[in-house]
Amino acid sequence: MRIEIEFISSNVLESKTDKEKMDFILNKIKDGKILVVEESLSSLDESKLIEATMNQIDEKFHGIEVSTLRESNVDGIREKVIRFLGGKTGGLTVIGPSKLIKKIKKEPQRISLLAEVREIRRVRKWK
Amino acid sequence: MPLSRLIKWFRSIFRRRKIIRLGLYGPPNAGKTTLANKISMDWTGEPVGKVSEIPHETREVQKKEMVVVRSGNKKIIMNILDMPGIATKIDYEDFMKFGMSKKDAQKRAKEATKGVIEAIKWLENVDTALVVMDSTKDPYTQVNITIIGNLEARGIPIIIVANKLDLPDSKPEWIEEAFPQHPVVELSALKGTHMDELYEAIAKYSR
């Protein structure tokens, strides 16, 4: 029973295009990892992530749980100006596979996450 | 007659601007279609779409055009756009819990994913948004925050609807605390209570 949490610097996503960013995140999520990104995704990025997720849902991958922590629950003027100038807004984003994350509870200054690994018992048949 | 055509063109723009595209957004099972039906029934006598307890019943944008709403001395003409619920996950097995076969559940899940994408794409094409939330549930979810953040980024007026006021667990004050920057209308779409307050808010805030 293992849960892998990967902490990612905001520099990693900075140089990527929107598509590369979404692919980078989703490839890791589909590998069963929980990501903690050192920046809060913008609302527009979140909607792009949801779109990209919907395009990849199939019998095995059922989607994501995502939560961002930022100063305000929406992008304020400060955040918009910082983004426009190419700066970092701070905060963080937690993203993981919905199969693994049982519950994600968001509060203005706190995110709590409950992950549960369902063990698949393999029964070996002896001849 | 270029002048008359120009006048006609200006008039058509003016007329088009007066029809408000009212988008109903929110997570699945918040009561968007129930509310769209209630608004449409109040003013046209016809419903917009089918309602179900199974999530993602609305998997395509449903429209009701030229709905004329009156509030006080204001008359608003609007196209109601009932959006599929926005979610970050869709598990076909959840539909099987409602007695659906695996094949039907997978088909519904596939359609639901397309519905979510369609709803997101429509964010750019609404003039005013009703963000419908289930007032018995914690409103501080990432889906609600993402929807509101996207609408704010586009400068679209937002009216939050604290729905399901008829249920004993309803706590609309949670919604007001979570999103103090937007008007909140508390109502029950199912029972049709406080609808006048919604029409007043639409008349006041929509553009």
Image (cartoon, coloured by chain):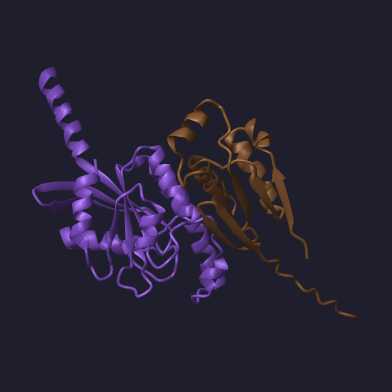
Q: Residue at horizontal 49%, vertical 40%?
A: A44
Image coordinates for residue B178, horizontal then vertical, percent: 41, 54
**Dividing the picture into quarters, in which one does residue A19 lie?**
top right
Q: Residue at horizontal 58%, vertical 38%?
A: A90
Query: Measured along the vertical axis of the image, is residue B128 above or below residue B26?
Result: above
Front residue of this view, candidates A40 and B1: A40
Query: Measured along the vertical axis of the image, is residue B2 above or below residue B147?
Result: above
Relative to residue B42, is residue B53 drawn left or right?
Answer: right
Q: How many marks?
A: 0
**Residue sitting at the far bottom:** A127
Relative to residue A25, is residue B160 drawn left or right?
Answer: left
Color used for chain A?
brown
Quadrant showing the N terminus of chain B? top left
Q: Residue at horizontal 52%, vertical 30%?
A: A82
Quadrant showing the C terminus of chain B? top left
Image coordinates for residue B152, horizontal then vertical, percent: 39, 41
Front residue of this view, candidates B163 and A118: B163
Q: Residue at horizontal 35%, vertical 37%?
A: B155
Instruction: Judge whether residue B48 can be spotted in this image.
Output: no
**Residue sitting at the far right:** A127
Image coordinates for residue A87, horizontal then vertical, percent: 57, 29
Image coordinates for residue B114, horizontal then vertical, percent: 48, 52
Instruction: Judge whether residue B72 can be spotted in this image.
Output: yes
Chain drawn purple in the picture:
B
